[in-house]
């Protein structure tokens, strides 16, 4: 059994990790930390986990965490980069769900996150954990930077087009929408039901922290510079991300082979589902499931490819992908703990 610890277990991604790991056949959750809720039983805070865990939240203790085989960080930015080096030095492997190790250019990271990065050595060594791109590197990694939710949906949707050099990369567009859980569990007037319900808005239109992460991944796939306009939106639902992606083909005649190209690229990927051409993936079709579901579209004879991509922001966009990465790191089947179908209705 893999002995796992979770640092920062009281947020939505933390409880999602607990939910998934509760039925994982190869994992025992040995400790879960929270400075603010230390001493409170997990099942008292999250009654859906009654009967699954006898754990209580504890103060972070390096010695306790160092007894684990792997530690998940489900913390605000700035925490993992301070705690990870000592755990790594003691042989613990890490999957970090925060943004601390996602961006390789640390000047860019500091500009977007408002603080200097403190562990340049491990930022360089960290593997960006998008399994559909970096599976081999993840397998041997000691530190995996779990991708963000928007970047997962956007990168997977554009990937085959960029890898095959089929589109003009000067100005891609990602129009994305997320449910309120993407903002986290902290108290925030703007996230109250009376503020979010029956409303719809863009935010971060002048620049969002996920933009440099998205650009970094797209440029890796393209092998060169990529221009991307990314605008996120808040919609009145709890879970889910829908990204509508736009790109112009270099050669419009290539449209005829795009469906088979996408199906071929993702045929062996356990958590990517390419739907028939012209389908409209729904966020509810992936709720609670570690799947990115996508479809291709074209309007009349336009050279513009439209890709619609949906994920559950808390699963494939966070905790589920983290468990998928852990499975790869320990040589387990990628489906372990992740086989449950989506919740409908």
Image (spheres, rainbow, N blue to C red):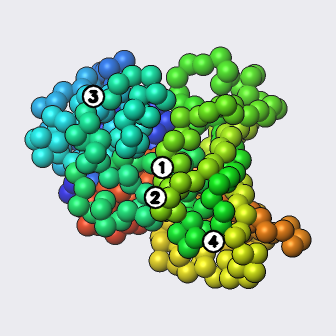
Q: Local crowd at mark 2 within 10 Å, few (<14), some, or many (≥20)?
A: some
Callout 2–callout 3 Cβ contact below 8 Å:
no
**Which type of secondary structure does the marked residue at label 2 adopt?**
helix
Q: Return the residue at label 1.
A: 216
Q: Return the residue at label 4.
A: 166
Question: What's the residue at 67%, 31% (across, down)?
Answer: 206
**Which type of secondary structure does the marked residue at label 4 adopt?**
loop
Q: Local crowd at mark 1 within 10 Å, few (<14), some, or many (≥20)?
A: many
Q: Earlier in the sequence, mark 2 or mark 3?
A: 3
Gap between marks 4 and 3, in whole Å?
Answer: 39 Å
Question: What's the residue at 10%, 41% (across, down)?
Answer: 90
Q: Return the residue at label 2.
A: 220
Q: Nearer the viewer, mark 2 or mark 3?
A: 2
Q: Return the residue at label 3.
A: 118
Whether residue 237 sits left or right of residue 150 in the image: it is right
**Which type of secondary structure does the marked residue at label 3 adopt?**
loop
Gap between marks 1 and 2, in whole Å?
Answer: 6 Å
78 to 306, vertically: above or below: above
Q: Earlier in the sequence, mark 4 or mark 3?
A: 3
């Amino acid at each position: 059994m893999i002995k796992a610890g979770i640092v920062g277990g009281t947020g939505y991604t933390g409880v999602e990790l607990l939910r998934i790991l509760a039925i994982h056949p190869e994992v025992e959750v040995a400790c879960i930390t929270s400075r603010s809720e230390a001493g409170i039983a997990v099942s008292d805070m999250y009654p859906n986990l009654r009967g699954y865990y006898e754990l209580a939240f504890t103060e972070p203790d390096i010695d306790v965490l160092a007894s684990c085989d792997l530690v998940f960080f489900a913390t605000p930015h700035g925490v993992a980069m301070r705690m990870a080096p000592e755990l790594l030095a003691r042989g613990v492997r890490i999957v970090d769900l925060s943004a601390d190790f996602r961006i390789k250019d640390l000047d860019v990271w500091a500009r977007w996150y408002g603080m200097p990065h403190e562990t340049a050595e491990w930022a360089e060594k960290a593997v960006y954990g998008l399994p559909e791109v970096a599976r081999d590197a993840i397998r041997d990694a000691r530190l995996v930077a779990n991708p963000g939710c928007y970047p997962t949906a956007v990168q997977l949707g554009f990937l085959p087009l960029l890898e095959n050099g089929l589109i003009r990369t000067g100005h891609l567009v990602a129009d994305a929408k997320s449910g309120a859980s993407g903002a986290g569990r902290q108290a925030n007037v703007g996230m109250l039901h009376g503020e979010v319900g029956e409303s719809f808005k863009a935010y971060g239109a002048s620049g969002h922290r996920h933009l440099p992460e998205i650009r970094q991944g797209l440029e890796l796939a393209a092998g060169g510079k990529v221009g991307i306009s990314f605008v996120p939106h808040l919609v009145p639902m709890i879970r889910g991300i829908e990204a509508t992606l736009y790109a112009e083909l270099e050669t419009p005649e290539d449209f005829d082979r795009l469906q088979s190209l996408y199906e071929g690229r993702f045929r062996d990927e356990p958590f990517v589902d390419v739907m028939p051409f012209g389908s409209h993936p729904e966020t509810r079709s992936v709720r609670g499931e570690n799947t990115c579901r996508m479809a291709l579209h074209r309007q009349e004879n336009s050279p513009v490819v439209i890709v619609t991509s949906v994920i559950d922001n808390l699963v494939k966009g966070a905790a589920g992908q983290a468990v998928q990465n852990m499975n790869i790191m320990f040589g387990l089947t990628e489906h372990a703990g992740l086989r449950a179908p989506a919740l409908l209705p």
